Amino acid sequence: MTNQFPGNAIAAVNSAQQAVNSTQTLTQTLLGYSGDSNGLPYTNIISNKQGTINRNIITWFIPQFGTVRMYVNPQNITYGDKKLISKERTKGGYTLQYWGEELTTINISGTTGSSGFEGINVLHEIYRAEQYAFDAVALTMSGNNAAADITNNILNGVGGTLGNSVNQLFSGNSSSPNSSAGLLGGIMGLSSPGASLAPQNIPSLAALAFSVQLYYNGWIFTGYFDSMNVRERADSFQVEYDMVFFATKRSGYRVNQFPWQRSANNGPSNYNTPLSFNGEV
């Protein structure tokens, strides 16, 4: 059986197809920007782009501490998405209720490599970083309580003396210290005599736990950790771990990063040059 499509003919067809694709610019439609009449975001990715070699290491942003890079990337990352749909069987058929989407579940598992258990220490501190961050918050709250006591004493003392002096001057009657303290607190911008001059906008433990961010290959996941497990292997002396991270928000866009990967817009019809990168391979 002879080959009906020789290599030079295929190359000519691919060259013609690339020339046609280069003339088709992205136009805005009712569904968005699209190169093949649909409005999905992937159609905005350029088919031929320069390939770069980078070491993409997972980076975590920890509130109150900044960014922390992992010593080595995990062996496996699983991204789980699920629709929240409830179904119920009735006499007339199934009734379906659509409640949106579940939170994205990210399962991370791997080994710390040559960093051993010190690598686990880093991951464990990332996992419970809100506990470390709340130490400073607890000290602030303690100082806030101490400042509240001092403020109350000052307002009641100074306010009472000022109120008695003003009332005796105009009416000859003495007012209660609490009313005078309230007047003085209003002048100082406090809502009540018991209000403190210390800052009130203190982050909660939940706010610190829910603000962790994961950066990897263009994706940014914001969420919180659910669980972490650590295993020590006696056969290889490796320390393994797995972590579960729930993402409340995903931003950014991830594209191909390896030279052998091809563009999803034009397909893998070119036998010589991957459509995601320029240059012969």
Image (cartoon, rainbow, N blue to C red):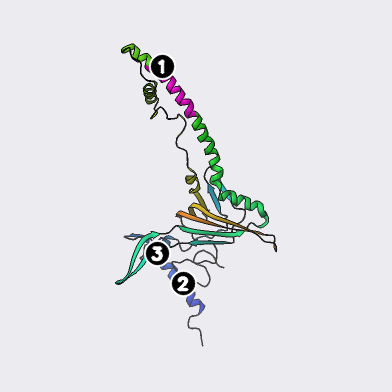
Marks 3 and 2, how far apart at CA: 14 Å
Which element type, helix, strand or loop, lies under badge 1? helix
Q: Are marks 3 and 2 in contact (CB under 8 Å)?
A: no
Residue at numbered disc 1: 161
Residue at numbered disc 3: 23
Marks 2 and 1, how far apart at CA: 92 Å
Q: Residues within 10 Å of mark 3 (few under 14, many from 20)?
A: few
Reply yes or no: does residue 153 show up in magenta.
Answer: yes
The location of residue 205, given as percent across then percent down, is 49, 44
Q: Residue at x 37, y 60 (%)?
A: 99
Reply yes or no: does residue 50 show up in magenta.
Answer: no
Q: Residue at x 45, y 26 (%)?
A: 152
State the quadrant of the C terminus. bottom right
The circle on residue 180 is none
Which element type, helix, strand or loop, lies under badge 3? helix
Residue 195 falls left or right of residue 212 = left
- The amino acid on which the numbered mark 3 sits, given as a three-letter code, is Thr
The location of residue 73, given as percent across then percent down, is 59, 57
Residue 281 falls left or right of residue 83 = right
The circle on residue 14 is 2
Mark sitting earlier along the chain (1/3): 3
Q: Which contiguous range is marked in magenta?
A: 147-163
Mark sitting earlier along the chain (3/2): 2
